[in-house]
Amino acid sequence: MAFSSDSGEGFLIQDPKLANSGRVKIDWVSRWMTVLNGLRDQFSDHSVFAGKRIAISIHLEAKTAYLAQIVKDLGADVWITSSNPHSTKDDVCAALAERGIHVFARKGAETGEYEKFVEKIVSCKPHALIDDGGDTTEYLHQHPEFAEELKGVCEETTSGVARLKQRDAENSLLFPAIAINDAQSKYLFDNRYGTGESTWSAITQLTNVTVAGKTVVCVGFGWVGRGVAMRAAGHGAEVIVTEIDPWKAWEARMEGFRVMPMHEAAPLGDFFITNTGEENVIRVEHMREMKDRAFLANAGHFGYEIDVPGLKKESKSVRCVRDDIEEYLLANGKRLYLLAQGNIINISGGLGHPIEIMDLSFSLQLASVHFILSTDGLENRLYRVPKAIDERVVRTKMQQDGIAIDEDLRNGG
């Protein structure tokens, strides 16, 4: 496969000639990431980032690229890859390489290549890691020689935080970690509003079919599932929720959605969206019962929530009918349409979260990395984002949008 690299392998990307397109995209998002811009200005007065090596593994598109640029502008040496090869934007990678950032990524990289990219970004022996999904964090646990100077990790997403919580419970963390996903400024907005809006933006753009009047089956009703269900209802769809958690199931019912097991929902849905982080929540026995021409999409971080290998075995033929839409002709004669190969739909098949949503998430990341680099004595355990950082981010956003709230007068405030 063709790659472009500099002679010292300071980067490995698909094509440097794509840089101009990437620069345009990064410039666009920079205008709307106002909280992040404010933090950059505040942190530029001192040298916390200067000379530090920062590794980043997040979906590599324009908003992530702008975060990387800011970290570099603050004086750090930045090494970056994508947490999911299917979400990588090659033109954005080219623009970062042009800026002197060590980028190792290409869209559609195979598993072996992806693992090599992870190895590349940690080979610098980073002082801090910004991770999404936990793959790079796990690699550092398996190869602790690369973590000798690591002061801490900031984890972006639900799946990665779940892996950190397991290690924390086992007392097996080798370095401090901050659960960015558990900050209120993250999960209340990014997971619900960001994923909800961007999931449906991607689906409607790819399919060009009407959502209103259709039946949408949301598999899982965590923060992501809430957002997907809410936006589906806003489009005029009837929403069915499937769950294994009784409290979440009852919450979905109290929100006005129908709740039932997947085997009952399978014949009813026009769209099926997985939002669980678990493997094979839509299986072959469900697909056999689905309507002809039902759509399947995954909004979770990892591409294993839909049993795609099983779907392939069950199908007489597979063909690409539109960009990022594959038609599977089942043995029973029904056609199912898989979006973005079962990978995370809002980024693999779309533009990802709205810019203002990621402004909050990446502001938490930048401020938390600053906290890690400037704080001595952190233990090898999982921390919440400091409340002062969480509140600072959301209050800054409200102030910029002209939103004022009452003062809390309790306890002499």
Image (spheres, rainbow, N blue to C red):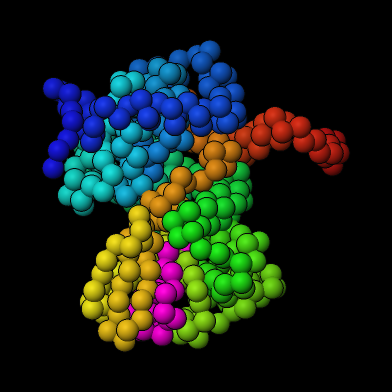
**Quadrant housing residue 71:** top left
State whether residue 52 appears in this view.
no
- Residue 316 sits inside the magenta stretch: no
Q: Is residue 127 above or below residue 154?
A: above
Identify the residue at horizontal 40%, vertical 52% (top origin).
349
Between 192 and 4, the residue placed more toward the observer is 4
Residue 333 percent across, percent down from the top left:
32, 84
Identify the residue at horizontal 47%, vertical 26% (top origin).
27
Residue 74 percent across, percent down from the top left:
44, 19
Between 103 and 390, the residue placed more toward the observer is 103
**Quadrant housing residue 89:** top left
**Quadrant housing residue 214:** bottom right
From which residue to which does the magenta span run? 275-297
- Residue 281 sits inside the magenta stretch: yes
Identify the residue at horizontal 52%, vertical 53% (top origin).
201
State whether residue 330 appears in this view.
yes
Q: Is residue 341 above or below residue 69?
A: below
In the picture, measured across the screen, residue 310 lies left or right of residue 171, that is left
Residue 327 percent across, percent down from the top left:
33, 69
In the picture, measured across the screen, residue 7 lies left or right of residue 374, that is left
Q: Dividing the image into 4 quarters, which one contains the N terminus?
A: top left
Identify the residue at horizontal 61%, vertical 44% (top origin).
185
